[in-house]
Amino acid sequence: MPETAVRVKTWPSHGLHVRTPRYLRGKCGVIERDLGSFPNPEELAYGLPGTPPRRLVRVRFTMAEVWGAAAENPADTLDAEIYEHWLEPVEG
Amino acid sequence: MSTDPEKTLRYHDMGGLEAGPVDLSEHDYALWEKRVDALMVLSTSRGLFTVDGLRRAIEDMGPDAYETMSYYERWIYSVNRNLIEAGAYTADELAARLQAVAARGADYATCSLAEPGDA
Amino acid sequence: MPHDHADHSHDHEHHHEGMSPSGHPYRKDQDGPLTHWQAMEIAVRELLVEKGIFTPAEISAAIGRMDARSPADGARVVARAWTDPAYKARLMADGSAAAAELGCTVDALKLVVVENTADTHNVVVCTLCSCYPRNLLGLPPDWYKNRAYRSRVVREPRKVLGEFGLDLPDTTRVRVHDSTADMRYIVLPLRPDGTEGWSAEQLAALVTRDSMIGVGVASAPA
């Protein structure tokens, strides 16, 4: 749900089709909005049915979180769509 | 070149990497490029494969394809691959047709049998 | 300045030698020797037609739909949002449904509209491929699909926007949107000053393609 803090998993994707960009893996952000469920693209890519559908959310990251000290402007933000199975809760 | 599969096979995943200035020049798409696009749109609308399948086969082409082939060249490679996987036609049929097409002439307009006004 | 042909008049009678009606060069391989990949396009198309999967007329119609779409479609949506607060509210809540009201269907994908304000500027990219709101803006410009834009705009958006001629003050918050999955994005640019009382039709002429991607802003009134 919106406002929830999440971290992008660091699963390797070794040659597999995924829609979670490398530069966001391991980064923490906040769910900006829930987008509903979609067939899983990681299955559709191989001609499989993509079931069960996966919830997709928009996650907002700060540039400070994504790029650390190299951020061009730390308070600027980056939003990306991430499927729920690529997200884990942030403790505390 | 790196042998790390995350870096080689996932070359499309380029967010945050170093690159030069943005080249702002533009071109209009050629007819053959628009036809590749149409083949993709119609194939997916017929349920033959998905845009995810298109992306997957392009991603598996590796870095060289990104550096040496144009956008719609990568697309037609991938459209063909997905169509063969879907059983739309066989590799033999494709090979025979490629030969026949090339035998028709020297340029695209001559080798494409469709009427000029077709699109 | 970014080359943005959204507001060019398309003069079909006086275009330059070797240039298309929209004023761009045709890609060189249009008339050169047949390439392997062009032959592949011909072969695949013919096989699919012979198998009865689709007809030449359907291919022509698909290209016709492609050619019919242009940034003018997105501009109508933006201008309506500038002039009709209730429409704008619907657009922000459900971009696909609101675009469909104006005849722009976004198919199975969903349109998300991100709004620029006095202190926020949005810009859209697809780092993984080149997802683009083609139903509202037509086919993407080359730079949107190329490595420099895709790799850099998520890391140094201000520097990249500067290369498009858009220099933002530090006080403006930049929000980059990476179209990683099933959404498509357009930016709702700021309505230019000095356009009070303008009609939606007048305003639409100020809405450039680049302003809806977020690498530019709407044109100032002449």
Image (cartoon, rainbow, N blue to C red):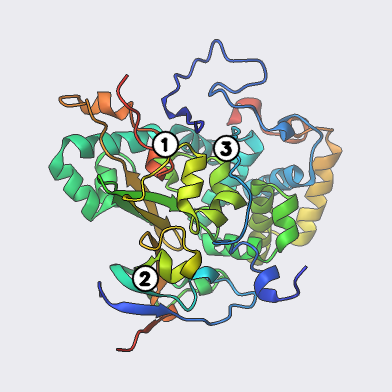
Badge 2: chain ID: A
Rendering quarter of residue C128: bottom right
Dot 1: within a 10 Å radius of its alpha carbon, few (fewer than 14), some, or many (20 or more) residues? Answer: many
- Amino acid type of the residue that numbered disc 1 sits on in the rendered structure: Arg
Q: Select label 3 or label 2 by which is in front.
A: 3
Dot 2: within a 10 Å radius of its alpha carbon, few (fewer than 14), some, or many (20 or more) residues? Answer: many
Same chain for marks 3 and 2? no
Rendering quarter of residue C35: top right
Same chain for marks 1 and 2? no
Q: Residue at x 62, y 15 (%)?
A: C16
Question: How far apart are labels 3 and 1 at the CA level?
Answer: 14 Å
Q: Quadrant of the C terminus of chain A?
A: bottom left
Is label 1 in contact with label 2 (beta carbons under 8 Å)? no
Q: Which residue is mark 1?
A: C209
Image coordinates of residue A70 in percent, x first then y, are 51, 65
In the rendered structure, find residue B53 and report the number of the disc placed on it.
none
Q: Which residue is mark 3?
A: B24
Residue A90, compared with residue C175, is above or below; it is below
Is label 3 in contact with label 1 (beta carbons under 8 Å)? no
Residue C193, compared with residue C16, is above or below; it is below
Q: Along the horizontal axis of the image, is C32 left or right of C161?
A: right
In the rendered structure, find residue A56 and report the number of the disc placed on it.
2
Image coordinates of residue C30 in percent, x first then y, are 71, 32
Residue B52, compared with residue A15, is above or below; it is above
Q: Residue at x 60, y 61 (%)?
A: B17
